């Protein structure tokens, strides 16, 4: 319990395949995925995780069939009605290109952020209509405008400045990135932020990812030494 990750990011993969294997529509898998979000949010809060960031809908997902996108947007609306935020004292935040979302979804996201703003146990961040390349490109464009206008000099552009302009500027970088569903890729998710995150991949589809599966991922994280470019001896020496 002394080495619980401060920030866990999750790529929630496998909803569609989970449903297909059961002879159901993909939307059925997305609904089951919401149940998994409830479980994992509650357990992360209980364990003392401070930030939980969930990859909910990528900018590339706009290329999916229109009926699936519509079902997903509807699911966002209904899932935000869930009182899990208040019951668990969880603050809700959202990152991504929200201008592409339907007005009703944007309004509900804003309402939920305001409604939970005073909650303090954990911050749950939903990455919605998000991709890391979009985020970094936007940040580079913003900084370039400031340089062109004379508000910044090229020498002012540092890693810290870039981090302070990203969508995630209000929270620390992830300590642990989990991907469910058996795929071994990052899929354009938090590419800048996970430079030193520990990565954990599992075959479990997201709807089946439960508290025990989360504990296994955290145990794997706890068994690793985070060196941040230093040697093992240097890290051990810092502990003394």
Image (cartoon, helix red, strand yellow):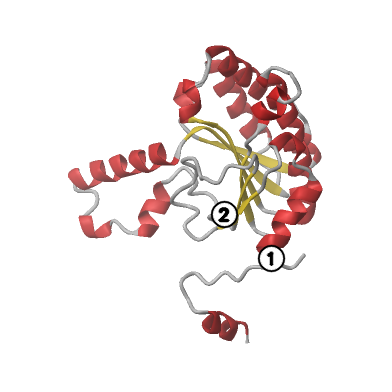
Q: Which residue is mark 1?
A: 222
Q: Nearer the viewer, residue 20 or 196?
A: 20
Residue 13 place in picture, x, y as percent: 62, 36
Q: Nearer the viewer, residue 239 or 146?
A: 239
Tag on residue 174? 2
The quadrant holding residue 24 is top right
Q: Is residue 152 visible to us here? A: yes
Residue 142 place in picture, x, y as percent: 31, 41
Side (left or right) of 87 relative to 142: right
Closest to the camera, between mark 2 and mark 1, is: 1
Side (left or right) of 175 relative to 63: right
Q: Residues within 10 Å of mark 1 (few under 14, many from 20)?
A: some
- Of labels 2 and 1, earlier in sequence is 2
Which of the image's four quarters has the N terminus?
Answer: bottom right
Tag 1's secondary structure? helix
Which of the image's four quarters has the C terminus?
Answer: bottom right
Identify the residue at horizontal 63%, vertical 68% (top origin): 224
The quadrant holding residue 148 is top left
Q: Residues within 10 Å of mark 2 (few under 14, many from 20)?
A: many
Identify the residue at horizontal 39%, vertical 58% (top origin): 160
Side (left or right) of 178 relative to 128: right
Residue 230 place in picture, x, y as percent: 48, 76
Identify the residue at horizontal 75%, vertical 43% (top origin): 40
**Above-or-below relation of 117 to 67:** below
């Amino acid at each position: 319990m002394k080495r619980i990750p401060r920030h866990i990011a999750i790529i929630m993969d496998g909803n569609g395949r989970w449903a297909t294997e059961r002879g159901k529509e993909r939307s059925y898998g997305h609904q089951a995925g919401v149940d998994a979000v409830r479980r994992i949010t509650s357990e992360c809060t209980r364990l003392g995780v401070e930030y939980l960031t969930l990859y909910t809908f990528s900018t590339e997902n706009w290329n999916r069939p229109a009926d699936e996108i519509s079902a997903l947007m509807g699911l966002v609306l209904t899932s935000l009605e869930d009182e899990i935020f208040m019951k668990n004292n969880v603050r809700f935040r959202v990152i991504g290109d929200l201008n592409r979302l339907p007005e009703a979804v944007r309004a509900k996201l804003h309402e939920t952020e305001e409604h939970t703003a005073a909650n303090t146990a954990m911050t749950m961040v939903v990455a919605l209509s998000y991709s890391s390349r979009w985020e970094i490109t936007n940040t580079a464009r913003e900084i370039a405008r400031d340089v062109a206008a004379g508000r910044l000099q090229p020498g002012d552009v540092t890693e810290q400045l870039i981090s302070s302009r990203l969508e995630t500027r209000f929270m620390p970088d992830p300590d642990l990135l989990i991907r469910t569903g058996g795929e071994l890729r990052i899929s354009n998710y938090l590419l800048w932020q996970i430079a030193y995150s520990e990565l954990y991949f599992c075959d479990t589809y997201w709807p089946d990812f439960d508290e025990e599966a989360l504990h296994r991922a955290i145990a794997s994280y706890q068994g690793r030494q985070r060196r941040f470019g230093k040697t093992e001896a240097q890290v051990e020496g810092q502990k003394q």
